Amino acid sequence: MPTTLLAMLQDKYPGQSPNSLRWIMQRRGRERTLQYGAEQEFMFRQRHQPGLCGLGRK
């Protein structure tokens, strides 16, 4: 994730986030994982109402 975040920052703010920042972000990511545990998966439950079609049609 830190590598993806760095790539996003470099795309959004060119010239402001050097590649050397990647190591720092990876280290902080490991520290966060040790402190709070691994990321939890989540999902948004959907309610299906009888009589309604998909894709927003009524």
Image (spheres, grey):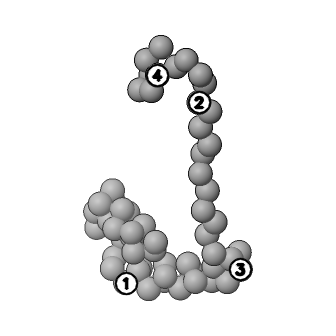
Disc 1 marks which amino acid?
A: Ser
* Marks 4/2: CA–CA distance: 9 Å
* Marks 2/3: CA–CA distance: 39 Å
Q: In the image, is residue 32 above or below residue 9?
A: below
Residue that carries the numbered disc 4 in the rendered image: 53
Seen at 64% across and 66% down, the residue is 40
Disc 2 marks which amino acid?
A: His
Residue 53 is situated, as x and y percent measured from the top left of the image, at 46, 22
Disc marking residue 35: 3
Seen at 60% across and 24% down, the residue is 49
Residue that carries the numbered disc 2 in the rendered image: 48
Residue 50 is situated, as x and y percent measured from the top left of the image, at 59, 22
Residue that carries the numbered disc 1 in the rendered image: 20
For marks 2 and 3, the one nearer the N-term is 3
Which mark lies nearer to you, 2 or 3?
Answer: 2
For marks 4 and 3, the one nearer the N-term is 3
Residue density around tag 1, few if under 14, some if 14–19, many if 20 or more, within 10 Å = few
Residue density around tag 3, few if under 14, some if 14–19, many if 20 or more, within 10 Å = few
Q: Is residue 19 left or right of residue 23?
A: left
* Marks 1/2: CA–CA distance: 48 Å
Q: Is residue 54 visible?
A: yes
For marks 4 and 1, the one nearer the N-term is 1
Q: Is residue 28 left or right of residue 8?
A: right
Residue 39 is situated, as x and y percent measured from the top left of the image, at 61, 69
